Amino acid sequence: MPKTTRSHTTRSYLLAAVLSAVAVCGGDAVARVFPFGPRHRAVNDLANQFVPFHAHLWDLLRGRADGGLLLDWQGGWGTSFLPDYGTYLSSPFAPLVALFPRGDIEYAVYAVTVLKTAVAAAAMTFLLRRLGPAGVWWWASVLGAAYALCGWSLAEGTYNPMWLDGLIAFPLLCLVGEWVREGRRPLLGPLVVAVCWFANFYTAYMATLGAALVLLVRLAVTDSFRWRTLLRAALTTALGVGLAAPVLVPVFLGSRHAYPGVVRDFAPAAGTDVLARLLPVTYSFATPAAFVCTAVPLLAGALLFRRDAPGRERWLWGGLCAAVAVSMQWGPTHLVWHVFATPNGSPYRQTFVLSGVLVLAAWTGLAHGLPDRRSLLGGAAVVLALTAGALPSALLTPWALLLAGAGLAAVAGALLLPRRGRYGLLAALLVTGTLLGQAAATTAYADRERLARLDDYPPWGAEHERRAAALAAAGGWPAYRTDAGLPRVAGNDPLLLGGQGAAYYSSHTPAVLTETLAALGGGWTSRGRNLLSLDNPVTDALFGVGARWRDGAVVRTDTRLPLVTVRPPGPPPVYGRSPFRNQELLLGARVYESPHAGACPVGTEVFLWAPDATGTARLGDHETRLLGGTPKRRAALTSLGLQRVPGLRPDLPGPGELGCLDHDRLRTAVTALRARAATSVRVTPDGIRATLPPGATGTAVVAAPHIAGWHCEGAAPVPYGGLLAVPAHGDLSCTFRPPGLRAGLAAGAVAALGLLGVTVAGRRAVRTGRSPR
């Protein structure tokens, strides 16, 4: 490659990356959003899942986490971690958060988000230059950055940063398709597929479908269609996915064991709204964020009218763009795009593929040079027709029309300017200015709208630092648990703040955990997958909680049990409707009294169970706020304080059940169980060991949910009221292995052997002079 060409190539990648980073940061600065202003980014799953999970990864990488890659001892009283890792943290970029201080985890996640966007721009630029030359090198940079700055990236990916790995995967997988078409890179191709699927299997699946469609068009356009090529593409994909199987299979099985989320029927968005989302500065949660810089639809539309481009090329690329757009609106293909399940949330998560296909169509036209006046006029007509179709939409904003119109005029003017000297520089400024202006404005608008429409949470600050420090100082794991307590900061407070509590939020929240917590009086949001901390003395005793955050300070308790206790011989508890009775069944003692005439005896602590109630409950001067309403929310069992006045009845916001806790009875029950508890307990990153009292009989119960994957020496584990248990015969030794790990490792080994075989066969073919095609 000539030195000048190499210089332009490197320059184009860097320019694309810089343009995308400048647009994202510039838009956030305009909106005065973190880290450029007082408004925070902590909305929905970004606050509930992604930041806490990255904080836990930071702890793992620094050796400070309770648990390891297979087992997380901090959230959900002990849960499988590998599925969460494969869903939220397996990106090659995720470990970069360890380079930041722990207290700057939100800065770290933001930096990784911007970096992923920049890499997506560079990757698309690389693909475009690989597909064919264009007259001016910087066009590849602009189109590459336009792809990375599509509406899906700015409105959806920015607060779901794990999805941005799919934004990177699409151009990389299209590149693999080119290698397959040319019969090149038999080793590197499957490795790239493996990295993409390992980084984020969900969006990689969508990117793979998109890349397959692009490959079919490329084969048809270049007259290189061969069944052998399709078989080689399928083999390359299968080998790559197989290499990622050690993570993919546990993720898949983790989803099967998860508490079922809501089942939705897909309802396509209104056509006018879909067209409106093609424009900058629009926002809606339930429509496809299909915006991409006006230069892209203009050039893609112009391709249809170019007489210097083959007819097959024009109509195949135009047809692909239309087919991908229509497939997002039709129920059967919607399910195909989303792994055959309508997602619980935004139903257009594949929109980045449409943006990528539009960019490839635009570049295909530029490969024949800049468009002439006739084709440019045709492209402008296409853009204006799409805009006219969007006019009835309520999503359309004046800024959308202004920026779209200004962008169309600027890009069209740039394409009409002479192509040398100062005019070339002016053209570059007009096009890049359009890109930056539209993308930054769309970013700023999305920032503001998300805060107005989505749940938001307080950003990390001094109060969180104080709370985390207090929890760390009170820690005594594994002698006892420390619960991050209430009020909650996010859905995964134990991962974010520290401790070992019940709170946990994931796509893989085990059904047994949700059902057990609910039976004991726990609360939830997100239809049972976002579990809340349960502040109750009985459950604290049962799960060995010796300290918890409450009312701005750490509160310690002496009524706690070790992690492993031995229960008398007999059948396991069978839960009923009342959480008070269920707690007593699991404890093995009666500790609650029933209220008389709606009032508890003096000296007992009054607890309210009203899972569907929303409002304020009061007992004297003590009040608490409930937020319930199944199936989306479930209010937790809550304390109304001590009964100090005879006959005082609580004011309730709705139907509920009262339980009157006798703390003396609880202490007596705990003392009795301690006499039969393990004399020592040791936890490991993948299991638990305990020394039981000599001659212990009955059932050894571990204060952890009986999730799939536990294996114990000497006997198969059994559930005991939803907890892990084994017959008491000598000491207890249990190891956790996520379901599917062995199968995934076996599949990965087979794929590695297959890749080795393909590589050897390819080298032999080269030595013997036979074409690998």
Image (cartoon, rainbow, N blue to C red):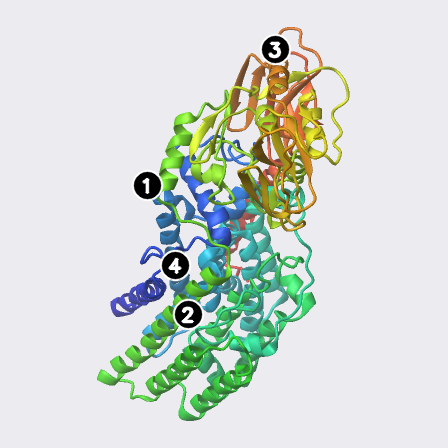
**Residue 684 image offset from top left, x and y in percent:** 51, 25
Secondary structure found at label 4: helix
Compared across the picture, whether 108 is left or right of 248 comes to: left
Q: Considering only vertical position in the picture, is 248 above or below 665?
A: below
Determine whether label 3 and label 4 are within 8 Å by CB: no
Q: Residues within 10 Å of mark 4 (few under 14, many from 20)?
A: many
Pointer 3 residue:
675
Secondary structure found at label 2: helix
Out of 759 and 658, give the one closest to the viewer: 658
Query: Quick one: label 3 or label 4, which is nearer the N terminus?
Result: 4
Using the image, tell me which numbered label, if any, was put on residue 442.
2
**Quarter where residue 99 is shown:** top left
Mark 3 to mark 2: distance in Å?
A: 64 Å
Tell me which amino acid carries mark 1. Pro
Q: In front of the other: label 3 or label 1? A: 3
Q: Residues within 10 Å of mark 3 (few under 14, many from 20)?
A: few
Mark 1 to mark 2: distance in Å?
A: 31 Å
Using the image, tell me which numbered label, if any, was put on residue 119.
4
Secondary structure found at label 3: loop
* Residue ranking furthest to the front: 646
**Residue 409 image offset from top left, x and y in percent:** 37, 86
Compared across the picture, whether 634 is left or right of 533 comes to: right
* Residue ranking furthest to the top: 694
**Quarter where residue 696 is shown:** top right
- Residue beneath the point at 38% across and 46% down: 460
Mark 3 to mark 4: distance in Å?
A: 59 Å
Pointer 1 residue:
101
Q: Considering only vertical position in the picture, is 57 above or below 643?
A: below
**Residue 665 image offset from top left, x and y in percent:** 64, 18
Out of 632 and 62, give the one closest to the viewer: 632
Mark 4 to mark 1: distance in Å?
A: 24 Å
Q: In front of the other: label 3 or label 2? A: 3
